[in-house]
Image (spheres, helix red, strand yellow):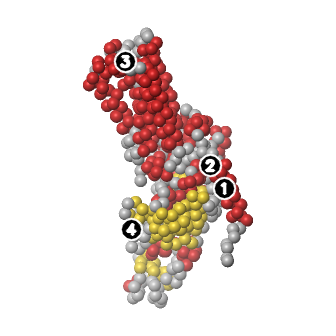
Amino acid sequence: MLVVNHVTKKYGNFTALEDITLEFTKGVYGLLAPNGGGKTTLIKMLATLLFPTKGEILWEGMEINKLGEKYREVIGYLPQNFGYYKNQSPRQFLHYLAALKGIDPTVANRKVPELLELVSLGDVMDKKMRGFSGGMIQRVGIAQALLNDPKILILDEPTAGLDPKERVRFRNLISEISKDRIVIFSTHIVSDLETVANHVIMLKDHKLFYNDTPANICQTLSGKVYETWDIESVTQPYFPLTQRQEEGRILVRFVCETPCPQAQPVTPNLEDVFLYIYRDEAV
Amino acid sequence: MNIIKPSPAEKEKAIEYILAQGLVKPKSLWQYLEELYRALGFRYLFVNTVQPVLISVALMTGFILLYPWPTEQYKNALLFATAPLFFIFAVVLTETVERSSPLYDLKMTCKYTIQQITAFRVFVFSLLGMVFCTLLSLFAGISEVADFFRAFSLSLCALFFCSLLSIFFLRRFPWRWIHLLPGMLWLVLGFSPLWLLQERWELFLSQVPVALTTTFAAIALGLYIKELKMLMDISRRGVVSYVGC
């Protein structure tokens, strides 16, 4: 079990994260916050790239920074801006990282093609990555993160820059590899979480806001989300979420804290919660 | 009195932890180096094949420029100043590439971190630097055995002092371009006495007892090895400094 215990991270006078307490067991955890909300700071602390100003992060009851290479052996990490060597092929690149991860060359020889097949790059494993699309590079990134068969897979904004088809492929891949391990991925794209995450962690004002299942988080807005074709008729104060044009009319979806008989109540989704919670922040 | 007793699983875990702490001996520098050599070999010391080629070209160019020895009268002074140049060039080149690499963060989360790889790489370069010093001393055209040993120990003195400077700065200071400083410092320290004092500097170096130069080389080597070990042991400060926070 991975435990984040009352962690605070400060950069000078700026508090990036304040008193965060979390527990991770097997499953997919989606970390949701607007840009600049502290997602990458938390991810980097879990990856031992940053250290908490206060508090501790424990793996199997031991402080991760004290565990050193023993902890690094159980993590797989995909950074937000995943760098690669353009003149290398995915196979060469993965062999290089396998060496840095201390993986035996005979194991690496077997594992590298296997992983490249898993991320559907088997047919281009010997081609230089120079001409690869963003999605292909991201898949190389996921393959490298899985090289050491990590117990904790940490992915920082893995779907950023992917087209819808690539995103669906990514979600399927995450579902496939999430058995028997902790997968933590940060995003500000809500639809990525709804389909794959068992738990959603939401940060607001650099503090932990929600840590629950997507269904339970959606329940917090139960009975408060409405849709109407005639928003002018709504007299109570409301917060608009989305609007959709159909046959020349506009369907408005909104949150109203008080009962709103003029509109149709609908089942809230995670995007509604996200838009409502972060209404004052630039998303 | 209410005492919360640990569960058998908690007890087991605590015992395992105590045993693990008690039985694991910290790795020595040689164990680290051997492990890194087994895992990475010389192949992964460089990012690509261009790096060793560039270093080899620089080495050959250096030899072509230094042989035949241009100034017969400044043999010791020139040897002292130029001995660490291969080492400096190799460290500056590989560190610049490493530090501007887009893989920096990712590599820091691998089993072998950039610090450890840097330490291993610097160690290999200092070994190659010793070969370079030997060749320089052999090709310097020194006929007397005592003079050869003086020249050789002087070149080792310069090499190990430069290696010590490099590791010292790399370990202690978090700045991105810190790896350039030891090289620049050496250009001042190594060449300015030759430029300012000229014959007096050569005369001084040619009269220094071999025992003294050997002792200095040994002290510099000892301190360098100690710094190398400290760079290998990842410290909290070390990792932070490398991420640039």
Q: Position of residue B140 (x, y in %)?
A: 41, 15
Estimate the spatial distance between the alpha carbons at disc 3 and disc 4, rounded to whole Å: 72 Å
For discs 2 and 3, the disc positioned in front in the rendered view: 3
> Which amino acid type corresponds to the residue marked 3 in the rendered image?
Gln
Co-location on one chain, circles 1 and 2? no
**Residue beneath label 4, please?**
A282
Q: Which residue is at the front of the view, A109 or A150?
A: A150
Of the image marks 3 and 1, the number of the one nearer the N terminus:
1
For discs 1 and 4, the disc positioned in front in the rendered view: 1
Q: Secondary structure at mark 3?
A: helix
Quarter occupied by the C terminus of chain A: bottom left
Image quarter of residue B139: top left
Given the image, what chain letter belongs to the residue carrying mark 3? Answer: B
Estimate the spatial distance between the alpha carbons at disc 2 and disc 3, rounded to whole Å: 58 Å
Mark 2 crowdedness (10 Å alpha carbons): few <14, some 14-19, many ≥20: many
**Residue beneath label 1, please?**
B18
Estimate the spatial distance between the alpha carbons at disc 1 and disc 4, rounded to whole Å: 49 Å
Callout 2 touching callout 3 (CB < 8 Å): no
Q: Secondary structure at mark 1?
A: helix
Of the image marks 4 and 2, the number of the one nearer the N terminus:
2
Given the image, what chain letter belongs to the residue carrying mark 2? Answer: A
Given the image, what chain letter belongs to the residue carrying mark 1? Answer: B
Callout 4 touching callout 2 (CB < 8 Å): no
Quarter occupied by the N terminus of chain A: bottom right
For discs 1 and 2, the disc positioned in front in the rendered view: 1
Residue A148 got which mark? 2
Q: Position of residue A205 (x, y in %)?
A: 43, 70
